[in-house]
């Protein structure tokens, strides 16, 4: 029996994609082998690779002057690759809205002069601050568009003028319509809305590829090298890319990003409507800035929070612990989480409340 998995990542995946992968596990399209056994240089695999990129381009309406890279190392590696590859003046501005934005800032500080131009730390990262005072000679401005730990998101993309905007979209990519042209670079770990862990997506405007500083980096860390090799400079995370292709096909069947956004808004509304009227639970993020993907909440009683996690697991509702930094509770309701799962969680919360108020 499958449970409802509210993990922040690796996260729930579309059941049809998993079932298709199961059918093709031992042999893909009568070729006599599994995808995970294929040479990354073979035509059979290259078809998968190219189809995955084409699907992503179509779903996100990625302009032709952007490269799509399939890399490894997760968003954490991009915290280092971004400043190294976009380095020109040796300066970058950061908006700190949570743990991951802060980690990106700290990692960039190893490479260049990183400046915090806005932060929401003063209210425990429960809101999105205004983005102002951008350095006129910054190489880029960095944001984290959706914050998994404290459950906030940028509803409006900051206008950074002629300074390139970079976004970590790991937990929000493909959950709502995004105008890619507003960004110089987008990166995302796949393990929330794209596919399994092991794959990292980078979408980068071509004019940002290949600075003088970047040309001196080890080859494996240069976007230019990966772009010229169509993400096949070294052995790609082939099976993760195959799984991403299946997940992207499923997303297209849901009406694309616009279609899934409506479903996501409906799922989030189920949770927030209950939290706003609950006598036991309360949401943590400020209402104006709430995430569609990650909903942290609490009873404000550690013992009750722990009891809730234990009893929820007995009902097949798993991975509802809050992040270890903030504690409490959290429901991550990514694209593949069905509405039925969210409704079951809300029903259980109502039942738990009735017994504990």
Image (spheres, rainbow, N blue to C red):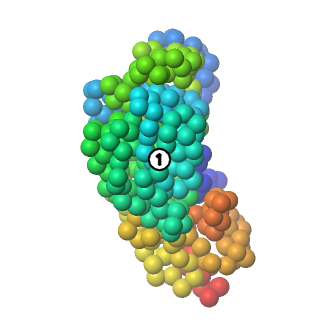
Instruction: Assess disc 1: are there few (<14), some (14-19) or many (≥20) residues with their C-alpha within 10 Å of its C-alpha.
Output: some
Q: Residue at x 36, y 41 (%)?
A: 165
Q: Residue extending furthest top?
A: 42
**Is residue 82 rendered to the left or right of residue 182?**
right
Q: Residue at x 41, y 28 (%)?
A: 88
- As helix, strand or loop, the secondary structure at mark 1 comes to strand
Along the viewing direction, whichever of 355 and 86 lies nearer the viewer:
86
Does residue 26 appear in this view?
Answer: yes
Vertical placement of residue 70 versus 129, above or below: above
Quadrant placement of the C terminus? bottom right
Along the viewing direction, whichever of 67 and 247 lies nearer the viewer:
67
Vertical placement of residue 178 versus 112, above or below: below
> Residue 227: horizontal and vertical position, in percent?
42, 20
Does residue 240 appear in this view?
Answer: no
Q: Please count the marks in the image.
A: 1
Image quarter of residue 24: top right
Q: Residue at x 38, y 39 (%)?
A: 138
Q: Which residue is mark 1?
A: 115
Vertical placement of residue 356 versus 140, above or below: below
Along the viewing direction, whichever of 64 and 102 lies nearer the viewer:
102
Q: Residue at x 54, y 85 (%)?
A: 279
> Residue 355: horizontal and vertical position, in percent?
64, 85
> Residue 159: horizontal and vertical position, in percent?
28, 49
> Residue 22: horizontal and vertical position, in percent?
58, 34
């Amino acid at each position: 029996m499958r449970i409802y998995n509210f993990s922040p990542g690796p996260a729930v995946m579309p059941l049809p994609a998993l079932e298709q992968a199961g059918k093709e596990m031992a042999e893909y399209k009568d070729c006599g082998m599994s995808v995970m056994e294929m040479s990354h240089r073979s035509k059979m695999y290259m078809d998968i690779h190219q189809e995955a990129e084409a699907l992503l381009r179509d779903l996100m309406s990625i302009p032709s002057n952007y490269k799509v890279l399939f890399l490894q190392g997760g968003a954490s590696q991009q915290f280092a690759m971004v400043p190294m590859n976009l380095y020109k003046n040796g300066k970058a501005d950061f908006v700190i809205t949570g743990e991951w934005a802060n980690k990106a800032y700290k990692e960039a500080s190893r490479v260049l002069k990183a400046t915090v131009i806005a932060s929401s730390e003063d209210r425990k990262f429960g809101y999105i601050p205004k983005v102002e005072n951008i350095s006129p000679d910054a190489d880029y401005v960095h944001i984290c568009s959706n914050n998994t730990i404290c459950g906030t998101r940028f509803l409006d993309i900051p206008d950074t003028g002629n300074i390139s905007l970079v976004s970590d979209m790991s937990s929000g990519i493909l959950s709502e319509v995004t105008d890619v042209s507003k960004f110089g670079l987008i990166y995302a770990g796949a393990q929330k809305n794209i596919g399994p862990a092991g794959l990292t997506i980078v979408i980068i405007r071509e004019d940002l590829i290949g600075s003088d500083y970047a040309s001196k980096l080890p080859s494996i860390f240069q976007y230019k090298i990966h772009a010229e090799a169509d993400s096949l400079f070294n052995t790609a995370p082939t099976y993760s890319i195959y799984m991403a292709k299946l997940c992207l096909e499923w997303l297209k069947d849901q009406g694309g990003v616009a279609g899934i956004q409506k479903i996501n808004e409906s799922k989030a509304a189920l949770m927030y409507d209950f939290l706003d009227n609950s006598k036991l639970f309360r949401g943590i993020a400020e209402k104006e800035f709430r995430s569609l993907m990650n909903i942290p909440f609490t009873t404000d009683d550690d013992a009750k929070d722990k009891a809730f996690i234990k009893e929820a697991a007995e009902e097949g509702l798993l991975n509802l612990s809050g992040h270890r930094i903030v504690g409490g509770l959290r429901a991550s309701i990514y694209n593949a989480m069905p509405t039925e799962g969210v409704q079951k969680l809300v029903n259980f919360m109502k039942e738990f409340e009735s017994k504990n108020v």
